[in-house]
Amino acid sequence: MVQGFQTPEEYQAYKELKEHYEEVTGDYSFSKRELTSQLEIALQNHRGVDFEEHEKEEYLDLVQKLEEFDSSLATHYRQLID
């Protein structure tokens, strides 16, 4: 994940593998990590600056997805964004 994907096909293969892994194991740590990483980057980029309304909606959508995996973590990020 750190080095990124070279093609859309690589990303799709990763997504399918991750979804299968999560379905079989019930371990959603990869999804949680993806969402929290995106939110952390957004918060770092907007330190001291309010989000524009469309950005805020986009990040709150990520928080909503995070809610499926970890409600307390989602609450934390929701408070930081609102």
Image: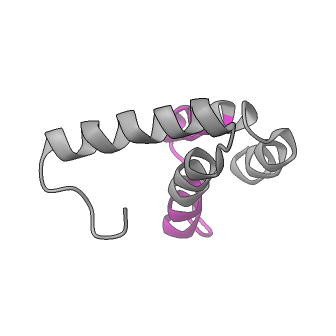
Q: Which of the 4 quarters of the picture holds residue 69?
A: top right
User: Is residue 60 something one can see in this rendering?
Assistant: no
Decide: is 63 above or below 49: above
| Image quadrant containing the N terminus | bottom left
User: Is residue 69 something one can see in this rendering?
Assistant: yes
Decide: is 45 above or below 15: below
Residue 43's x, y, as percent?
59, 61
Residue 44's x, y, as percent?
55, 69
Q: Main secondary structure of the magenta part?
A: helix
Q: Which of the 4 quarters of the picture holds residue 40?
A: bottom right
Question: In the figure, is residue 5 to the left or right of 65?
Answer: left
Q: Nearer the viewer, residue 45 or 48?
A: 45
Q: How many marks can you see?
A: 0
Question: In the figure, is residue 33 to the left or right of 71?
Answer: left
Residue 20's x, y, as percent?
48, 32
Magenta-drawn segment: 39-63
Q: Which of the 4 quarters of the picture holds residue 33?
A: bottom right
Q: Residue 51: within the magenta?
A: yes
Residue 60's x, y, as percent?
63, 35
Colouring of the image: one colour
Please give the name of the residue rendered at 48% of the width and 66% of the height, measured from the top-left corner.
45
Q: Nearer the viewer, residue 63 or 7?
A: 7
Q: Residue furthest right?
A: 72
Please give the name of the residue rendered at 82% of the width and 51% of the height, measured from the top-left corner.
76
Q: Nearer the viewer, residue 65 or 43?
A: 65
| Image quadrant containing the C terminus | top right
Decide: is 8 above or below 40: above
Q: Residue 26: within the magenta?
A: no
Question: In the figure, is residue 64 to the left or right of 30?
Answer: right
Decide: is 54 above or below 39: above
Q: Residue furthest front?
A: 24
